[in-house]
Structures are given as structure tokens and as C-alpha cells.
Amino acid sequence: MLKAEDYKHHVTYFNRMEDENKVNAIPNAQSWDWMKANIPLFDCPQDNFREIYYYRWWTYRKHIHNTPQGFVITEFLVDRNYADKYNMISCALGHHIYEGRWLHDQRYLNDNVHVWFRGNDGGRMKKLLNFSSWTADALYNRYKVTQDKAFLLDMLPDLDSEYKAWEKDRRTESGLFWQTDVKDGMEESLSGGRREQNARPTINSYMYGNAKALSAMAALKGDHAMSGFYESKADTLKQLIDSKLWNADSAFFETVKKRGKGPFAGVKEAIGFIPWYFNIPDEKYDAAWKQVSDPKGFNAPFGLTTAERRHPEFRTHGCCQCEWDGAVWPFATAQTLTGLANRLNAPKPEVLADTTYFGLLEKYVESQYYRGKPYIGEYLDEKTGYWLKGDQERSRYYNHSTFNDLIITGLVGLRPRADEVIEVNPLIPQDKWDWFCLDDVHYHGKRITILWDRDGSHYKKGSGLQVFVNGKKAGSADRISRILINP
């Protein structure tokens, strides 16, 4: 439906707006050709949404590095002394997979995952387990897009081994998992410390998501015993998260001190929304979501803070040393917005609305500028939007979050599923945009187009919301609403 050349000017601008600080597998000169071959096209009437969409694919491409063992995807462009071989860091691996699952060529992710799990003489890279992981969940959710069953099941033994390694090292007597904040990639948090071993919503939610994914993978393989084994683990973790990490007094999922034996940390943090990333909570926990709209909670002028703004220790840990004491981190923003989209797609989201999602995503868009140019870095001041490491080379193009996955699965609303039903539920307020289009999405071996044209005058393809499969109209609605297409 869309013509790729209509969006080339974005890349022409990105290529000339600043120096090319490092060249990896695809240099700037080849960036448009690579993007044209690899990404879904997106069009909308709001220029900044469109610009940041293409900017984030342009920056993701910068992190694809060709090594003797295949392609890898980095977090920093500049070398870090705590990285593994090829400058790899595992902290944002789940984000890399969720974002990259929409690329038309999946070799980049295939290679990256293989190097992480088999690049050390056939075994795991030495630093794969340096950070908490939701890799099994990410790979299963990638399968929901690509349907590459062979790759997924080939990885099952590796992912099973990884899960057991975390169990051996981080599970407590209660069944909860503990972690230090720095090993969550969230150092200097208000709830913990670099050496504090606390039961955190992060790792426990990740392990639930991984267990659910491993159960589903085993079922695909026909291994019902293994599937039931991991389903049981997931059920146990859900009960523990609900009963141990939910603070009824604050109506929020919180960190519990001393490996889960101590008191609640007494602070609401963005990590309390991570359970919804994996669809863990029931609707009785929805009160937590009131905090994303509360200026005393997480709602700041330039995005969602990582700790509640009302807390007396908010932003007290200094500046510019990677503090998670309240500043806005895209890593956490992406997790929270993914969880929010999940909740809005579940039954009875009574404390939330599509306007909430759109407003928060719009702030995320607006935050991704620095000195008037598109920019994605490490973290930013919640009141001014100033990137706190914006003048450091290490921060530029920081590949530590998702954005385009939020556009595709949340805003435009293509909801990946394991079955053959195509589900579309845009989280765009009814009267916000007169038109938008997401085109050439490779999904389940098909090519999907999702198009909204209020009166049919913009795209000349008819009015309303329409879904095309391989160029043929397969579903429609007069208003922006959920569409289910059965094959």
C-alpha cells in the first residue's frame, strides 16, 4: 500500500545529521537499502511518530555486527570493558529479540542467539548469565511472529539448561528468585543496592515468562511431561508473585528485602509493572495502573519515571552514574508500555484507556530528541528531557529498549498469536488520527497491511479500519476496534 521511497528522506537526514562514529555490518551508506529490504513501513499524520519509527530502525541496524561466528547485536556501539566477546552484553537481549522479530531477514537474530548460547566452544558465552533474562519468553514470542518451529525447538535444550542454572543460583527456599539491582541492569535503585540480595518483581516475572515459554515449546515438541513440568513451575511462581510481592497497603508489586524474608522495600518502582509484561496479574491488581497517570506517581513531563516521584529519596543518588532512583530509562519505559498494552488487550481494563497508552507513548516519542535531533540514549531527566549522558559517546544509539515493537503490537495493534487467527486491536484514540498504515509486515508467512482511513480520502482504499493479507482485504471495521480474522 505504501511506497518505500516516500520515507527515504528520513534516512537521508539521519545519515547527514552527524558523524558516523562506528561502522558495523551495514554502514550508513547502505542503511536505506537495508531498511527497505527488512522493515515494515509505517505512515501516520504525526511527523514525530513517523520520524522516530524510522530512526529506531536506523539505529538498530547500527548494532548489527558481523563476527567470525555470525551476526551479533550489541547494546553499546563503543567497546565496554565489562562486555563479553564481540562487545556483547546480555542485559537487553530480550528487548533485541522483541524488536528484531519484525525484521524480514531473521538471520541476524538467529545468529545472535546462537552466539550467545553456543559461541563459547559450543556452550554459553561466559557472561550470558550476568544479567537477569527473559530470553525464552522473547524467543517464544518471536515464534508467534515467524512460526520458525525448527529454530525454536533446536534452542529448547539450551533454554532449559539456562532456566536450571538460574534456579541453582538464584532460587530461594520459598521458591521466589532473588537478584541484586545491578544484575537487573538497574543499579542505584531505591529498593536495593549492588550487593543487596532481594526478591524483585523483575527476575521473578522473567522466570515466570520463561517457564510459560518453555512449557509451550515442550508442547510444540510433543513432550507433555516437560510441558507440564514447566507449567507447574509457572503456576507456582504466579502464586508467589501474587502473594509475596504484592503489597496490599500500597496496592503495588514491590521488592521484598533479604531474599524475600524481609519487609517490603517501601517504594513503588517501574519494575512493579513488569508482571503485566508476562500477563501474570488478574484484574484485581489493576489499582497499580493508576500510578502511570499520577504526577506524584510515575507520570512526569518527559515520560515514566523509574521510581514514584512522591518518594522522599526520589532522584537523590546524584547524577550521571546510571542511577535508577527515578530518572526516565527507555529500558523500563518499553517494559511498562508492553505491560500496559497487554492489560488493555485483556478483559475489563476499567482503570485504563487507549488514551493512556497513546499519551505515554507520545511522551516516549517526544523524549527521543537531543539538541533538536532524533536521539536514543541511556536515561534522561524527567522534567527537562535532558539526556543525562547525552554528551558521552557511549550513550549515543543506546540499544537498550524497544520502540517499534510498541508501535506494531500496541499502537497499531497487531497482536502476535501462536494460532492462525490474525488479531488487530489498535490502541489509538478514536478521534486522534484520520489515517495511518502499517505495511508489509511479515507475519506467519504472510504479508499483512493494517490501514485506517476515516473517510477513505487519504489512501483511496475505502473508509474505516482494514486488514489486508497478501494484498487482499481480509477484515474491516467502521471504527478503530478489535478485528479477528480466522483463516
Image (cartoon, rainbow, N blue to C red):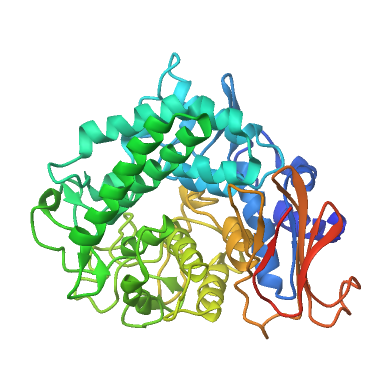
Residue 43 picture location, percent across and down: 76, 66
In depth, the one of 29 and 88 nearer the eye is 88
Q: Residue at x 49, y 56 (%)?
A: 377
Q: Residue at x 41, y 59 (%)?
A: 279
Image check: 408 left or right of 37?
left
Residue 218 picture location, percent across and down: 45, 33
Residue 66 picture location, percent across and down: 62, 28
In depth, the one of 9 and 476 nearer the eye is 476
In depth, the one of 216 and 98 nearer the eye is 216
Q: Residue furthest top?
A: 121
Image quadrant where residue 339 sits: bottom left
Image quadrant where residue 131 sits: top left
Q: Report the quarter where the N terminus lies.
A: bottom right
In depth, the one of 180 and 487 nearer the eye is 487
Image check: 337 left or right of 421?
left
Image check: 334 left or right of 455?
left
Q: Is residue 78 above or below residue 192?
A: above
Q: Residue at x 57, y 61 (%)?
A: 406
Q: Residue furthest right?
A: 460
Residue 365 picture location, percent across and down: 57, 68
Res 191 seen here: no
